[in-house]
């Protein structure tokens, strides 16, 4: 089962959120890698080529908007789907998410199950592959 597991890179500075999202994603069969800020997120995305990135927008050093832009401009990483996690359900955030190249967008606070179902839209369910 681990052989065909998809890898999700979770870029999130809040420890509670990291634990919650990481735990439920693993429960649903995904491998999870974590990064605590935008710089680390970019580095891990380049080094590990995850199947999908969950990108908190409010993160230290390089924010999620900029980190997404960097990865979407890089031919080596632009194919990786990025789901943005933003603190506000503002229309302007949704527009910005699309502008910088996010593939999808979730407003926080976001139920763990909503995160999983959004990830499944891109990666499929563990048993369905
Ligand atoms: Mn944050």
Image: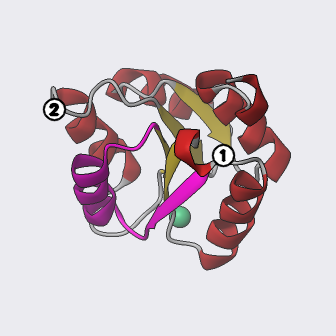
Which one is nearer the viewer's eye here, 120 or 96? 120
Q: Quadrant of residue 18?
A: bottom right
Tell me if residue 115 can be seen: yes
Write the start and end of the magenta stretch as one range: 30-51
Q: Percent x, y for residue 52?
A: 48, 38
Residue drawn at x 63%, y 52% as measured from the top left: 87
Snapshot colouring: secondary structure
Q: Is residue 77 magenta?
A: no
Instruction: In the rendered view, tell whether residue 26 sits above or below residue 68.
Output: below
The residue at label 1 has a CB less than 8 Å from ligand 1? no
Q: From what the image shows, is residue 80 above or below residue 55?
A: above
Task: Identify the residue under disc 1.
Answer: 1
Mark closest to the chain's N terminus, 2 or 1: 1
Quarter that holds the C terminus = top right
The residue furthest bottom is 15
Viewer-nearest of discs 2 and 1: 1
Which sits in the foreground, 92 or 3? Answer: 3
What's the residue at 76%, 49% (across, down)? 110
Specify few, some or many for label 2: CA neighbours under 10 Å numbering under 14, 14-19, or 20 or more.
few
Residue 78 position, x and y percent, is 27, 27
Residue 114 in the image: x percent, y percent? 80, 40
| Mark 1, secondary structure of its residue | loop
Question: Separation of disc 2 and disc 1 at Cα?
Answer: 31 Å
- Residue for point 66% across, 37% down: 106
Q: Neighbour class for label 1 at 10 Å: few (<14), some, many (≥20)?
A: few
Mark 2 lies on residue: 74
Viewer-closest of 117 and 70: 117
Residue 45 shown in magenta: yes
The picture places residue 33, in percent across and down from the top left corner, at: 48, 61
């Amino acid at each position: 089962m681990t052989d065909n597991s998809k890898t999700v890179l979770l870029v999130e500075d809040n420890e509670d959120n990291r634990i919650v999202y990481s735990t439920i994603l693993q429960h649903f069969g995904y491998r999870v890698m974590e990064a605590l800020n935008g710089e680390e997120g970019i580095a891990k995305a380049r080094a590990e080529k995850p199947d999908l990135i969950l990108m908190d927008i409010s993160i230290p050093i390089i924010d999620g908007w900029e980190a997404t832009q960097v990865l979407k401009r890089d031919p080596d990483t632009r194919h990786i789907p990025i789901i943005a996690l933003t603190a506000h359900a503002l229309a302007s955030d949704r527009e910005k998410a699309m502008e910088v190249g996010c593939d999808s967008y979730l407003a926080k606070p976001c139920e763990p199950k909503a995160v999983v179902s959004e990830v499944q839209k891109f990666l499929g369910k563990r048993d369905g592959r």
